[in-house]
Amino acid sequence: MNAPAAAHLRANGGLRPPGAGDIVNAPAATAPTPSAVESVESIEDVVARYDPVIGLETHVELDTASKMFCGCPTAFGAEPNTQVCPVCLGLPGSLPVANAAAVESTIRIGLALNCSVAAWCRFARKNYFYPDMPKNFQISQYDEPLCTDGWMDVEVDGQTVRVGIERVHLEEDTGKTLHVGGAAGRIHGSDYSLVDYNRAGIPLVEIVTRPVPGTGALAPVVARTYVTELRELMRTLAVSDVRMEQGSLRCDVNVSLSPKGSGVWGTRSETKNVNSLRSVERAVRYEVLRQARVLDSGGRVVQETRHFHEDTGETTPGRSKEEATDYRYFPEPDLVPLAPDPAWVQRLRETLPELPSVRRSRLAEQLGATPFEMRSMANAGVVDLVAATVQAGAPAAEARNWWLGYLSQKANEAGVETADLRISPEQVARVASLVSAGTLSTGLARQAVDGVLATGSDVDTVVADRGLRRVSDAGALAAAVDEAIAAQPGVAEKVRGGKVAAAGALVGAVMKATRGQADAKLVRDLILDRLDAR
Ligand SMILES: [Zn+2]
C-alpha cells in the first residue's frame, strides 16, 4: 500500500479458528417437478450438435480474524447477532474501514491465478434490498476489480484445459436468514423468518472465469476439476478454510449451448450456490441436457438464475437475471481507493508458496506415483503425510499403503482428518522398517500403530511395553504347538489322516496363545511336521 491508502487500513489480520465458515441461505424455490431430462439422451449425443460453454463464479470466505469493514470477530457458530456492530449492522453514521489482511489475501489469490494486480482501484456500492443485508447495499467491486486477466490450468483425462480468469474482486458477505415452520427451511410455507447478522460483513473474494468453450462432453468434469483445483489453491495459500458444506466456498455455475459450427453463443443460465464438488458436475450435466432439449424443441433458453436440488440433481428457475444497471453501482464514497504499493505486491509474489500443480508433479516424481495414485492420495488428503513418511525413510509403496489403508480407516472410525491422528510420518516410517526387518508381522505392526494412536508414545516404546515381537524361533513355539495338539485331539487326528486343511484350527490356537506374535507360516510347518502330515 502507498502511504495514504495504508493509513486507512486496519492491520487486523490473522487466521480465525478452524471450524469457521457459514451455511448459505436456503434457496427460496418451489419443489422441482419430476422430469425425464437426464434419461432423454447422453451428453455425448448433445455435444454432437452443440458446444457447451461453461463459466464459474466462485465465492470464497476469507479466514481473517475480523470482518471486512469493521473489527467484529468472524468465528463460525457463535450465538446469532453477537458478532455485530454499528458498521456491519448498517446503522446511520457508521463508517467502514478496509481490512488490510483481506486485501493482502485477495492479491495473493490473484497472483497465484496469474492475474494483473490493479495499481489503483475502488470499492463500489451494489444497491439492492434483502433482509439479510442491513445497509440495503453491498460493498463490492464493479468496474475496478483488484485483480484481472489471469488463468489456471486444469488436467482432465490427460488433457490440459486452460481456464481464463476474468477477475478476482473483494466484497462483503451478507447475513443469514432462517425460515421457521416451512419444509426444508424454505421461505414458502414458513411461519416467520429470523435473521443472523454474524456473517454480514465477512470478507468474500469472488473469482470469475471467462467463458470456457470447447470442452465438449468433458464440460461437467472440467467444471468440477476447476473448483477442486481452486479449493486446493486456497488451502495452499491458507486464506480460507474452503469448507463447501459450511458455505465458505460456494459456486455459481453458468452454462450455455452454442449450435455446433454456428459461432453464435447461446443464452446462459446461472445455477446459484452449488455446494459440493459433485453437485458442480451434476449441475453442469443437467443444464447441458435441459438446454439441448429446449433448443431441440424450438424453444429459447431464458437468461435466469436457477436453483440446484441436491436430492434430485435437477435445477429449477429462480428469478430472471438482473442486469448490472439494476444495481445502480457507484463508487463507494465512504472508502478511500486501494492503491497497492508495487514493492509490496512484488514481495507477495515472491513469497507465494509452491502451487498445487507444481507440487503435484514434483511429488509424483519423488514418490514414483502414477496419476491415479496421486489422485487417490489427494482425495484422501494424505499426499503430505506420504511424502513425509518417505522422507523419513519408508519405501513409497509402504508409506502409501499405511496412509491410504489402515490409517485412513482409523481416521474414519475416529471421525477426524487423517492428518490429525496421533501418529507422525516418522513413526509410520519406523513401523515400516520394523516390518521389513521381520521384527513385526503386518498384524503386529497394526497393534503397534494402535498403541501409538492410543497413547501417543513412540513405536519402540509401544513394541517394548506390549511385548510385540514376532516369535519365529521354532524352539520357543514348540510348547504352544504341543498344547494346541493336545487340546484338540480330534482335529489332530484328521490332520494325521491327511486332511491338511484342518490344521488351520490348530494354527489359530497357537496364534491366539502367542497373542498373534508367532510366525503363522512357521507354526503351520511345525504342526504338520509334528503330525507327520507333510
Ligand atoms: Zn461489525
Image (tube, rainbow, N blue to C red):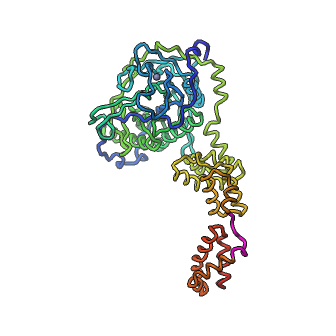
Please give the name of the residue rendered at 66% of the width and 72% of the height, measured from the top-left corner.
Answer: 521
Please give the count of numbered marks on the rendered protein. 0
Q: Which residue is outermost to the front?
A: 465
Please give the name of the residue rendered at 56% of the width and 48% of the height, measured from the top-left corner.
Answer: 380
- The answer to whether residue 479 is left or right of residue 4 is right
Q: Is residue 209 visible?
A: no
Q: Which residues are magenta?
A: 468-477
Which quarter of the picture shows residue 405?
Answer: bottom right
Which quarter of the picture shows residue 420?
Answer: top right
Question: What secondary structure characterizes most of the magenta part?
Answer: loop
Which quarter of the picture shows residue 80?
Answer: top left
Please give the name of the residue rendered at 61% of the width and 46% of the height, measured from the top-left corner.
Answer: 383
Q: Position of residue 337 (x, y in %)?
A: 53, 15
Q: Which residue is outermost to the bottom?
A: 497
Q: Nearer the viewer, residue 80 or 156?
A: 80
- The answer to whether residue 377 is left or right of residue 436 is left
Q: Position of residue 223 (x, y in %)?
A: 48, 39
Q: Nearer the viewer, residue 444 or 255?
A: 444
- The answer to whether residue 191 is left or right of residue 492 is left
Q: Position of residue 120 (x, y in %)?
A: 56, 16
Dividing the image into 4 quarters, which one contains the C terminus?
bottom right
Dividing the image into 4 quarters, which one contains the N terminus?
top right
Asked if the magenta segment contains residue 386, the reply would be no
Q: On screen, 140 above or below 214? A: above
Q: Position of residue 467 (x, y in %)?
A: 68, 63
Please give the name of the residue rendered at 66% of the width and 74% of the height, measured from the top-left corner.
Answer: 523
Asked if the magenta segment contains residue 471, the reply would be yes
Q: Is residue 304 visible?
A: yes
Q: Nearer the viewer, residue 413 or 219?
A: 413
Q: Nearer the viewer, residue 173 or 410?
A: 410
